[in-house]
């Protein structure tokens, strides 16, 4: 299929990255994806696959050919006995969750939102929370990719294992993922329990809370004393989600009105009157309330995020969490520009994926945010210096300033990743400026 010259500008969800691709292309099949990659090579243009644009970094940006995979969606095969499900790469997590639900299957763990495409979410190492669970990429059984020469290859733990170790979190650097085979689990119901707890108490019990709950996380408003502790636990198979489900009106009130509309209003007030931010933030913290409900897993994992923000997130060794939060608390009163949004803390098990932020270590994830349009650089810089002390690894899709020289010592298999990349894409067909920053120039490969 021919790519069309287009004046359209690409822009990510947060407005932190824009690009003007020379061509746009919307393939509807593997052969068309392969043809688009070959055409780009003939024209001497780089290629990037686009997801939903929910990375805060310019991971998907290209000045060459932008591959819009929104016409390449849906489940192509499902074995409800083994849980193996093959999915086209442009499928959004929202559509996937709905289709899996129809098969009485589910993903074992998910992040906070479902707007991402499956391949986009995997490629930057998207994760949820759970001390015994890894990020989304650990749920992948095999992948199919179009490489730089247009060939279609499959990889799994037993077939091309090095490509598999690299491509599950590959930042789009190795090829265009066309299909993903996921290891799904039978649908399950989660019991959600959320309650405000003094931050000191949460930090003291952090290890025990992470170990005792299937999915544990907490939010802390930087000018508040309490954290909102979220515990989501799996109910035994067969438990009816409707038993203690939140009524529709209450769901609307709590998720749409309180967490989005009301919080959005406070944020807008803070943007106009930044001096009020500490008080508004402290008020948001004081207004935290308890709730318990049960629902189908993805309806508990995922919440609407309508208030726009910028975000940075680092994975740190689990045991250093107390130090990191302590330092952040000390930094907050010294900030030139106050911060409106909460800090979010999650956990994940160690895994063996080469560029996984949880590679080889039990991790805690610390995410900081700022309301869109408010200054954030000072907060983000201080955060980076704090997490650097404990060998923090940045989320590949969230704002960070690390380059190849800083990233290489953080990942034991970083050079292996670059070697595999040089083997499958010797000319850097899938390169862009973000990849040049995080992996160095093509000739350094
Ligand atoms: C509101 C919000 C909430 C978020 N919540 C979480 C969370 O809970 N946990 C978490 O870990 N992250 C979270 N993120 C970050 C987000 O999950 C990642 O940045 C993810 O990569 C975005 O997916 P996307 O489909 O938008 O991909 P994009 O941002 O469009 O692209 C990401 C990368 O994937 C590549 N890519 C896309 N498709 C393909 C393909 N077919 N083959 C090869 N490469 C491909 C792109 O080229 C790019 O490099 C959140 C982001 C936002 C904005």
Image (tube, rainbow, N blue to C red):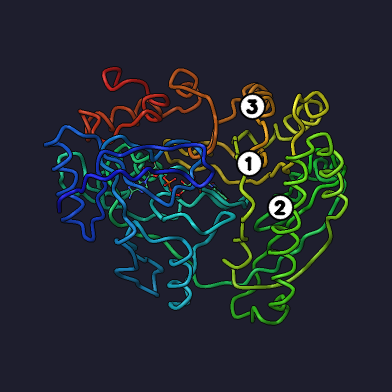
In this rendering, the answer to whether 230 lies above or below 8 is: below
Mark 1 Cα shell of 10 Å, populated few (<14), some (14-19), many (≥20): many
Asked whether mark 2 and ligand 1 are closer than 8 Å, the reply comes as: no
Q: Residue 232 in the image: x percent, y percent?
A: 68, 62
Asked whether mark 3 and ligand 1 are closer than 8 Å, the reply comes as: no
Instruction: Kindly identify which numbered label has been placed on residue 372.
Output: 1
2 and 3 marks in contact (CB < 8 Å)? no
Residue drawn where x is 59% and y is 76% of the image? 237
Sequence-wise first label, 1 or 2: 2
Q: CA distance from mark 3 to mark 1?
A: 12 Å
Q: CA distance from mark 2 to mark 3?
A: 21 Å
Residue placed most toward the observer, 19 or 359: 19
In this rendering, the answer to whether 231 lies above or below 164 is: below
In this rendering, the answer to whether 44 lies above or below 269 is: above
Q: Nearer the viewer, mark 3 or mark 1?
A: 1
Sequence-wise first label, 3 or 1: 1
Instruction: Kindly identify which numbered label has been placed on residue 264.
Output: 2
Q: Is residue 356 left or right of residue 267?
A: left
Q: Residue 82 in the image: x percent, y percent?
A: 39, 69
Check disc 3 and report its element: helix, strand or loop: helix
Q: Is residue 296 left or right of residue 30?
A: right
Question: Where on the picture, by quarter, is residue 193?
Answer: bottom right
Q: Nearer the viewer, mark 2 or mark 3?
A: 2
Residue drawn where x is 67% and y is 42% of the image? 371
Check disc 1 and report its element: helix, strand or loop: loop
Give the residue number, with chain letter if any, for mark 3. Answer: 377
């Amino acid at each position: 299929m021919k790519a069309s010259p287009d004046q359209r500008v690409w822009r990510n969800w947060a407005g932190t990255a824009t690009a003007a691709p020379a061509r746009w292309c919307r393939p509807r099949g593997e052969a068309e994806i392969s043809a688009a990659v070959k055409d780009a090579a003939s024209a001497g243009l780089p290629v990037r696959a686009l997801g939903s644009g929910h990375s805060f970094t310019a991971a998907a940006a290209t000045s060459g050919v932008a591959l819009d995979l929104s016409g390449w969606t849906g489940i192509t095969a499902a074995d409800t006995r083994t849980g193996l499900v093959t999915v086209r790469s442009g499928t959004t997590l929202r559509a996937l969750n709905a289709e899996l639900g129809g098969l009485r299957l589910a993903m074992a763990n998910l992040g906070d939102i479902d707007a991402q495409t499956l391949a986009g979410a995997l490629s930057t190492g998207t994760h949820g929370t759970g001390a015994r669970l890894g990020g989304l990429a650990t749920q992948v059984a095999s992948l199919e990719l179009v490489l730089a020469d247009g060939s279609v290859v499959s990889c799994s733990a037993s077939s091309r294992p090095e490509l598999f170790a690299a491509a599950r979190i590959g930042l789009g650097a190795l090829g265009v993922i066309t299909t993903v085979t996921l290891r799904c689990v039978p649908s399950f119901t989660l019991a959600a329990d959320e309650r405000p707890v003094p931050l000191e108490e949460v930090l003291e019990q952090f290890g025990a809370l992470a170990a005792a709950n299937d999915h544990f996380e907490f939010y802390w408003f930087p000018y508040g004393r309490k954290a909102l502790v979220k515990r989501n636990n799996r109910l035994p198979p067969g438990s009816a989600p409707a038993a203690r489900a939140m009524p529709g009106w209450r769901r609307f009130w709590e998720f749409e009105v309180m967490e989005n509309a009301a919080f959005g209003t406070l944020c807008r007030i803070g943007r106009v009157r930044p001096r009020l931010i500490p008080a508004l933030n402290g008020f948001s913290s004081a207004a935290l309330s308890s709730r318990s409900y049960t629902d189908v897993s993805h309806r508990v994992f995922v919440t609407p995020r309508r208030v726009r923000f910028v975000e940075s997130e680092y994975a740190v060794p689990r045991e250093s969490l107390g130090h990191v939060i302590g330092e952040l608390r000390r930094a907050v009163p010294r900030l030139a520009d106050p911060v409106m949004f909460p800090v979010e803390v999650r956990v994940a098990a160690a895994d063996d994926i080469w560029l996984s932020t949880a590679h080889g270590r039990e991790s805690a994830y610390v995410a900081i945010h700022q309301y869109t349009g408010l200054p954030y650089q000072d907060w983000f810089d201080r955060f980076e210096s704090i997490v650097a002390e404990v060998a923090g690894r940045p989320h590949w899709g969230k704002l960070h300033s690390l380059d190849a020289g800083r990233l290489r010592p953080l990942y034991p298999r970083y050079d292996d990743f670059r070697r595999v990349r040089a083997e499958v894409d010797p000319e850097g067909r899938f390169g862009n400026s973000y990849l040049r920053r995080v992996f160095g120039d093509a000739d350094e490969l």
